Every structure is written in C-alpha cells, then in structure tokens.
Image (cartoon, rainbow, N blue to C red):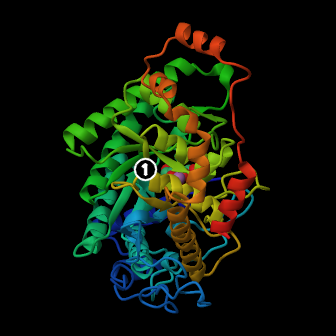
C-alpha cells in the first residue's frame, strides 16, 4: 500500500490549520483583536519561527562518508562511493539516486489499521510556539528537512507530488498560490547547488473527487480538474528544473467492471495523456525530457489500466504515444503484477522504453505494496545488469519510492534506510559489471544458447527474408530431430551465485 501522508487526517489537519489562519487574518483585517491563544501566530513568535539553522539529524555527519565493505559504521556507505568508476563511468552517474519527498518527509507511519506513529521534528510545532503552526511555515520546514537529508546522503535528485510539498487551500486558486510559494522556496534552496527534481507528478488519487479516477472518472468535471492539476504540476516541475514528469494512475482503473465503460475510460486516458504531452513538449518546451508512466496492476483500484510494462507499452502504441512516454518501473509494482523487478526492467529495455526505476521491494508474506528499501543483492544485480546493458539512463534515475516501517520512528532510521538502499544498488552495479562482461561466464552460457542463430539460416530469418515454404523444405531435408542444447540453468545459477556471493 502506497501511503502518501496525504491521508485524510493529514489533509484535515492542513485544512484546519489553514482555516484557523484565515479566520485570524480576517479578524485582524476587520480591526478585531486576536485571542491570546493565537497571538503567538500573528505577533511574530510563531510566524517568523522558521529557524534556518535548524538541524534535523544532529547525530549524523554533514555528509555520509564511504568507508568500504569492512566498515561497521552504521552512518557510512559500504559500497556506494560516488566517484568510483564502474564500467568507465562514476557510480553517481550510473545510479542517479533520488529521494522521494512523500515517503521520506511525509510518511507518518499510518496504515489502514493504525494512526501515525512517527512524530517528525519537522512536523512539530515551531520552536517557541505551542499552537498550530502556520501550514506554509511547516511546508517550508519540511522542504528544509528534505534538503538536509539530500545533502547528508550526497543525493542531487528528488521526486515530489504537488500535494506533498504544499498544503491545500479552500479553492484551487488558493492551493495553486501556496504551491507557487513553496516551489519558489524550493528553487531558492536549490540555487547554487546541483539539486533538482528527477521528476514531479500530480497527485490525482487522494482527494474525494478522485474516488472514481481522474482522467478515467465518469465525471467530466473531475477530468477538467485533473487536467488543471497536471498543468500546474508540470509548471512546478519545469520551474525547478525537473528531468521528467511522471504519471502513476492510482485510481485510473475500476472498482466494479459491470458498471464501467472500459473502452471509454481508456480512450479518455489517452486523450488526457495527449494533452499532457502537448503541454509538456510544445508549451513548456520540454522535448528531450521524457514523460513517464509508472505501471501498477492494482491498489488502490481493483484493476489499474497500466497493469505492467507490457500492458502499458501496448496502450501507448495503440494511441500513438510510444515516442513521447517512457516507463518508470517500480519493483514492488512488478511483484504485485506477478513478475520480478528484473523482468519488468528487461522488458522495458527490450522495448527501448525504460525511463526510470522506483527502487523498492515488497514483502513476500504481505500482499500489498509495502514499499520497502531493496536490499536483496541478487535482485539488485539482475536489475542493474539490465540497466547497464541499456547504457544507464539520463535523463532518468533511481528513485527511492520506499519508506521506513511503521515501527521505525527515529529520524536516523531514514538515514539507515537510504544508506542500505544506496549500498544495495551500488553493490548491484559492481556485480552487474561482472555479470554483463562479454568475456564472462554468464554471457558465454547465454551466447552458447543462441549460437545456432549465427549461421546463414538464422541470419536470413532474422532479416525477415525467409518464408514458411522455404523453411518447410529445410525441415523436411533435415535428418532426425532438430538440434537443441541444454539450458544450463544450474550452471548459470552457480555462476551468478559465485559473483553475487
Ligand atoms: C504508488 C507509487 C507512487 C508513484 C508516484 O504505488 O509508487 O508513489 O511513484 O505517484
Ligand atoms: Co512509485
């Protein structure tokens, strides 16, 4: 389950705080006196309480160092060494890590069965103020927390939903104004650094009006609202220098097929994507910064139209969108669709459509999208093998769409989680370099399996020049059964085990 911390409780708190502020300002403008309990908010104690020197991870070094595989320092990398060259490129350029704002800063530990467990310092009342803090100050403080986390991890890219980073107002106009202010604040924090978004996205699944979907909603009003939201989120992404814009269609599917006009809904989704493509490429001039679709089979909808890589690629081709969109593969979505993560990445690579990776993993005993940090080095090595064979991605990158567990309530848990995730990917990259080596044992086994295709017959078939009539003649002239060799799976498994350890 993909908890966004845009849960209703959070939303309610934001709206409540915004309303209190609004009433207060109205009172002042009308010449009224504020009640003592809110005086702190308006007299400056709270409103200017945003401390630019506040440190959220006081126990951690300024930058997490690389200390090597033998290190036992929990606040050091064992494998991720940003400048170390692997296959002719610094690790940093292969991996292009990104921190997910929603999971790292907004995840409060709530799940469908329980209330928040995490009391993050950036959500606490502002210093010296025990009344509800102004929501915009809190939003700015959360942004500061993100930047501190990124600096400490040495990560330059981040991903956001429009509604994670800024509060909602009473109207779309108000909400947009607050988003603009936070985007400008983030731009200031980015200024003079290499930090920028990997991608932005519009959150089109949390608010009640999106209950039937956004682009696939039976309500044209909702479609219109979603279009407006995407336009604004694209503006924000461009303003911050984001490399991609991502679509994850959480409720773009159905809950009940007998009352769903599936053909109409898929067509509406395609029209929506075309309008988004036109705005991104033509109006915003973002050609060369691919739009992404992130497949997921279900959850929260019973069935999502972007089920997996194959289905989504088919959809894009059906509507002539395959040139403008690439796929952002999420590992836990892959497993929910009954695939492995490496299957989905390999499939996207084979189609020339890999745009990015949401690096996470599920729990085999829990049936939902648990969004855990990936630590399995065999899976990491196989995923990275496909990414290396496709020559990495830029634009594009590896986004940690992953969260700490509900029970992990300490700020340092966020550091341990990212360190573990980054180390797993870095080790995966080093192992992949061995696995994909053309002179290596695994590649030899693979080449051997296809060796019969190197002859004249194979080449002619691959060129598309052979006919069934011709091949029938060949088959009839062949003596005995067709030649076919061993699959050598056990040998290959042993080779992988020897590399992966
Ligand atoms: C949900 C999910 C999203 C997308 C962005 O499962 O993965 O966080 O990555 O909306
Ligand atoms: Co994701």
Q: Quadrant of the C terminus?
A: bottom right
**Residue at 71% over, 48% down:** 488
Where residue 34 appears, as percent x and y from the top left, is 39, 75
**171 left or right of 377?**
left
Q: Position of residue 47 (x, y in %)?
A: 35, 78
For this rendering, which residue is in front, 422 or 435?
A: 435
From the viewer's perspective, tell me whether residue 398 is left or right of residue 186.
right
Left or right side of 107 for 313: left
Which residue is tagged 1? 390
Helix, strand or loop under label 1 = loop
For residue 148, above or below residue 178: below
Q: Identify the residue at horizontal 41%, vertical 38% (top origin).
A: 226
Q: Is residue 326 above or below residue 31?
A: above
In the rendered image of this protein, does residue 148 appear above or below residue 297? Answer: below
Res 270 quadrant in image: top left
Q: Residues within 10 Å of mark 1 (few under 14, many from 20)?
A: some
Location of residue 225 by image quarter: top left
Q: Position of residue 258 (x, y in %)?
A: 68, 19
Q: Nearest the camera: 473 or 101?
A: 473
Q: Give the mark count.
A: 1
Asked if residue 120 is positioned above or below residue 289 in the image, the reply reads below
Q: Nearer the viewer, residue 467 or 192?
A: 467
Of all residues, the one furthest to the top in this rendering is 469
């Amino acid at each position: 389950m993909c908890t966004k911390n845009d849960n209703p409780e959070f939303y309610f708190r934001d709206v409540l705080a915004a309303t209190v502020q609004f009433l207060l300002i109205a009172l002042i403008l009308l010449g009224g006196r504020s009640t003592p309990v809110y005086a702190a908010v308006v007299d400056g104690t709270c409103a200017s309480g945003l401390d630019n020197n506040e440190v959220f991870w006081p126990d951690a070094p300024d930058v997490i160092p690389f200390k090597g595989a033998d290190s036992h320092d929990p606040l050091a990398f064992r494998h991720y060494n940003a400048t170390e060259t692997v296959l002719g490129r610094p690790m940093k350029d292969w991996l292009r890590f990104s921190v997910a704002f929603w999971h790292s800063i907004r995840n409060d530990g709530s799940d469908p069965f329980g209330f928040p467990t995490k009391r993050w310092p950036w959500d606490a009342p502002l210093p010296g103020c025990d009344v509800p803090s102004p929501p915009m100050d809190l939003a700015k403080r959360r942004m500061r927390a993100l930047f501190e986390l990124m600096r400490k991890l040495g990560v330059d890219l981040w991903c956001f939903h429009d509604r994670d980073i800024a509060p909602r107002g009473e109207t779309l106009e108000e909400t947009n104004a607050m988003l603009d202010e936070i985007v400008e604040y983030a731009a200031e924090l980015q200024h003079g650094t290499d930090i920028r978004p990997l991608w932005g996205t519009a959150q089109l699944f949390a608010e009640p009006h999106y209950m039937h979907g956004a682009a696939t909603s039976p309500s044209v009003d909702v479609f219109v609202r979603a279009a407006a939201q995407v336009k604004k989120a694209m503006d924000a992404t461009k303003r911050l220098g984001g490399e991609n814009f991502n679509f994850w269609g959480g409720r773009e599917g159905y809950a009940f097929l007998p009352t769903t006009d599936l053909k109409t809904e898929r067509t509406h989704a395609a029209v929506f994507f075309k309008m988004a493509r036109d705005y991104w490429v033509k109006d915003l001039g973002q050609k060369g910064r691919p739009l992404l679709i992130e497949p997921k089979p279900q959850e929260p909808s019973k069935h999502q139209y972007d089920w997996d890589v194959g289905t989504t690629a088919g959809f894009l081709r059906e509507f002539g969108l395959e040139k403008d969109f690439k796929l952002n593969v999420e590992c836990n979505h892959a497993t929910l669709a009954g695939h492995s993560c490496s299957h989905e990445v390999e499939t996207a690579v084979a189609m020339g459509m890999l745009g990015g990776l949401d690096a996470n993993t599920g729990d085999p005993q829990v049936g939902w999208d648990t969004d855990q940090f990936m630590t399995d080095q065999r899976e990491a090595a196989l995923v990275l093998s496909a990414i290396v064979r496709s020559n990495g991605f830029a634009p594009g990158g590896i986004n940690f769409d992953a969260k700490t567990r509900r029970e992990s309530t300490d700020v340092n848990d966020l550091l341990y989680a990212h360190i573990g995730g980054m180390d797993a990917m870095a080790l995966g990259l080093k192992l992949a370099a061995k696995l994909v080596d053309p002179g290596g044992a695994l590649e030899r086994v693979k080449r051997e399996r296809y060796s019969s295709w190197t002859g004249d017959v194979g080449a002619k078939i691959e060129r598309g020049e052979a006919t069934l009539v011709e091949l029938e003649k060949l088959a009839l002239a062949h003596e005995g059964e067709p030649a076919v060799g061993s699959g050598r799976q056990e040998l290959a498994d042993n080779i992988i085990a020897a590399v992966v350890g």
